[in-house]
Image (cartoon, grey):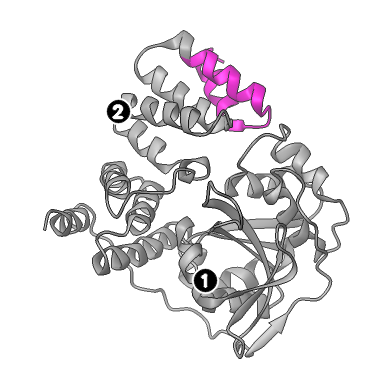
């Protein structure tokens, strides 16, 4: 009963219309399709993100291997995570040429098939249970280059499993939602308007978050013990700037249905951002410390970054500066830490 009341409270906090905007007539989607010319790379150590991005870019004639993208995205090979915004920044700002990357959430299989059928490679960020790994769940990127409705599968270039690796639609539906059904589309800049038309109301970043929030809310209503539904609500609320609601949703995600996978905050940092915005600095420090303790020494620059923001909130300037220095030492290209350090130093 308490959880159902919480759902009602969350929805009363924010009057949101999820009505879909009228869009132009979209092209028909064939029952099967695949892109030609995508090169496969098996990932090197901890290199899923750069390897998958390099495969997506290869469709457009990009010839550099995964090491080139990794040199900027994760200069420390021990880095366990490359976030979607970092991939977009690399393509849009640091990669020479006219290719671009767009990040959205709340995707659907129908949308993925539409995009692929119009010759847009699509990267998905999804949960993954690696075989023969006693530590279990982790995050993973998939490069979708095709699909087949008769077989009920997406065709992927999987940096871990291999080329032409198929995932059945129910598997994708289950594990993709672990990351709020996030997708990254790479495209030539001259096709940008075409892409936005295909995305419909999701072309607008704010409306996209509203759409994703509604999808997560419906899942939480259907199963209030679903931690991923609550986490996705928190992510969408945070993206909309409603940090109070985001914090409530993230609290629920951490406490219902057995909680979240222990690696969850290796990849998604919304709880840190929400708690920071509502002044829950000690909770941020506790989360950061648990990552350091539970991660077996595995380091993530975001851990130091959000620890620094919490220390700044508590007025502990020198400890904050030390944490930011650690984040930058670990990844010199992590722009949020550089920006925060410059502000701290009065630059």
Left or right of 58? Residue 134 is left
Q: Residue furthest top?
A: 318
Write the residue at 40% across / 35% down: 272
Viewer-closest of 210 and 63: 63
Which residue is label 2 attached to? 279
Write the residue at 80% across / 49% down: 66
Tell me the CA gap for discs 1 and 2: 38 Å
Q: Quadrant of residue 197?
A: bottom right
Position in image of residue 174 (x %, y %) = 46, 67
Q: Secondary structure at mark 1?
A: helix
Position in image of residue 287 (x %, y %) = 39, 31
Left or right of 326? Residue 253 is left
Q: Is 37 situated above or below 231?
A: below
Which residue is label 1 attached to? 171
Left or right of 98? Residue 219 is left
Q: Is 1 situated above or below 271?
A: below
Question: Crowding at label 1, few (<14), some or many (≥20) Cα neighbours within 10 Å?
Answer: few
**First to last magenta residue range:** 320-347
Q: Residue furthest right?
A: 63
In this view, the mark in front (1 or 2) = 1
Q: Which mark is residue 260?
A: none
Question: Is residue 39 magenta-colored?
Answer: no
Write the residue at 62% across / 39% down: 80
């Amino acid at each position: 009963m308490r959880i159902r009341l919480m759902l009602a409270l969350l929805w009363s906090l924010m009057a949101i219309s999820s009505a879909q905007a009228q869009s132009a007539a979209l092209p028909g989607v064939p029952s099967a399709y695949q892109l030609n010319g995508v090169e496969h790379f098996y990932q090197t150590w901890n290199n899923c993100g750069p390897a998958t991005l390099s495969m997506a870019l290869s469709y457009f004639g990009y010839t550099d291997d995964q090491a080139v993208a990794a040199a900027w995205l994760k200069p420390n090979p021990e880095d366990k995570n490359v976030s979607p915004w970092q991939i977009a920044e690399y393509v849009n700002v640091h990669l020479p040429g006219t290719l671009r990357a767009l990040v959205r959430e709340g995707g659907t299989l129908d949308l993925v098939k539409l995009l692929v059928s119009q010759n847009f490679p699509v990267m998905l960020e999804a949960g993954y249970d690696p075989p023969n790994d006693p530590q279990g769940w982790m995050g993973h990127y998939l490069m979708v280059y095709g699909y087949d409705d008769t077989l009920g599968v997406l065709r992927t270039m999987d940096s871990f499993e291999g080329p032409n690796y198929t995932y059945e639609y129910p598997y994708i539906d289950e594990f993709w939602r672990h990351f709020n059904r996030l997708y990254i589309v790479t495209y030539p800049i001259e096709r940008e308007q075409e892409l936005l038309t295909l995305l419909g109301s999701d072309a607008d970043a704010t409306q996209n978050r509203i759409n994703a929030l509604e999808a997560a809310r419906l899942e939480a209503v259907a199963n209030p013990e679903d931690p991923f539904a609550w986490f996705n609500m928190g992510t969408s609320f945070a993206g909309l700037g409603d940090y109070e609601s985001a914090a409530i949703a993230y609290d629920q995600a951490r406490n219902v249905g057995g909680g979240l996978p222990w690696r969850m905050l290796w990849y998604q940092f919304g709880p840190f951002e929400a708690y920071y915005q509502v002044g829950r600095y000690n909770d941020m420090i506790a989360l950061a410390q648990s990552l350091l303790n539970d991660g077996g020494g595995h380091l993530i620059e975001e851990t130091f970054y959000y620890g620094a923001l919490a220390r700044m909130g508590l007025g502990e300037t020198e400890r904050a500066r030390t944490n930011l220095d650690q984040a930058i030492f670990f990844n010199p290209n992590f722009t949020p830490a550089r920006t925060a350090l410059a502000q701290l130093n009065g630059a």
